Amino acid sequence: MQPLNEKTVLKNPFKQFEFWFEEAKQVLERDNPDSACLSTVNANGEPDGRIVLIKEYDERGFVFYTNIESVKGMSLLATKKASLTLHWDELHRQIRIRGNVELVTDKEADAYFNSRPRGSQLGAWASRQSSTLESREVMEQEFEQVSKKYEGKEIPRPTFWSGFRVEPQQIEFWQQGDDRMHDRLLFTKDEVLGWKIDRLYP
Ligand SMILES: Cc1cc2nc3c(=O)[nH]c(=O)nc-3n(C[C@H](O)[C@H](O)[C@H](O)COP(=O)(O)O)c2cc1C
């Protein structure tokens, strides 16, 4: 595997992300190599974390889709800040992304929603994500109701379901080394100078 150091690292962190992310998707024989822990704080400063799937990325940032009225949605709308942590144990690599958060455009959210399987579209309608649910049966009844409602029809994207883009201020690449002498390269965005790269003690 390629070492991570000042010579090998791509000077554009999005290109370096792409290099590792695409390698993980090709090499790993397991589900969800695109999963990441999304960390948030709510309006009271209380932290939380959960897994989401990174569905799109480009130089604007990293996008995942969710219910915007969920616990994470409310925290993101309140603070506009988040981090994403990816870990590929098999490759001995970790990436940490920290930045500001914005909702994607309706056009982007519609395009992704329309690409999803019909069952997932119905599931989005049937879930009031993070709210208390009386029983599984209630959720199944709600799924049935929306299935009937949209039978033979195109399913529109719920207004409460969209994507968030994490626009990174920092991206850190970590690769395991022997004797715990790991390599950590931290990219920090400078609005004038572009991306600065620092090596951190592991
Ligand atoms: C592998 C995996 C992938 C997941 N992907 C997503 C996702 O892309 N979007 C999402 O809303 N929840 C996803 N979840 C569920 C979340 O981890 C979480 O349970 C849910 O979003 C509710 O979080 P909240 O109550 O903090 O808002 C995923 C869970 C797992 C285990």
Image: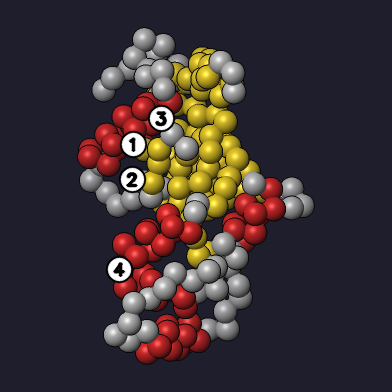
Classed neighbour count for the residue bearing mark 2: other residues with Cα under 10 Å, few (<14), some (14–19), many (≥20) = many
Q: Secondary structure at mark 2?
A: loop
Q: Answer yes or no: is residue 113 visible.
A: yes
Colouring method of the image: secondary structure
Q: Earlier in the sequence, mark 3 or mark 1?
A: 3
| Residue positioned most to the front | 107
Q: Disc 1 marks which residue? A: 21
Q: Secondary structure at mark 3?
A: helix
Looking at the picture, does residue 27 appear above or below residue 105? above
Q: Amino acid at mark 2?
A: Pro
Looking at the picture, does residue 195 appear above or below residue 105? above
Spatial CA distance of label 4 from label 2 is: 20 Å
Looking at the picture, does residue 11 appear above or below residue 172? above
Q: Disc 4 marks which residue? A: 117
Q: Quadrant of the N terminus?
A: top left
Spatial CA distance of label 1 from label 2 is: 8 Å
Give coordinates of residue 164: x percent, y percent. Answer: 52, 51
Residue 7 quadrant: top left
Nearer to me, 31 or 178: 31
Q: Earlier in the sequence, mark 4 or mark 2?
A: 2
Q: Earlier in the sequence, mark 2 or mark 3?
A: 3
Classed neighbour count for the residue bearing mark 3: other residues with Cα under 10 Å, few (<14), some (14–19), many (≥20) = some
Residue 83 quadrant: top right
Give coordinates of residue 23: x percent, y percent. Answer: 27, 34
Q: Answer yes or no: is residue 202 visible.
A: no
- Residue found 34% across the figure and 33% down from its top: 18
Q: Amino acid at mark 1?
A: Phe
Which mark, residue 14?
A: 3
Q: Disc 2 marks which residue? A: 33
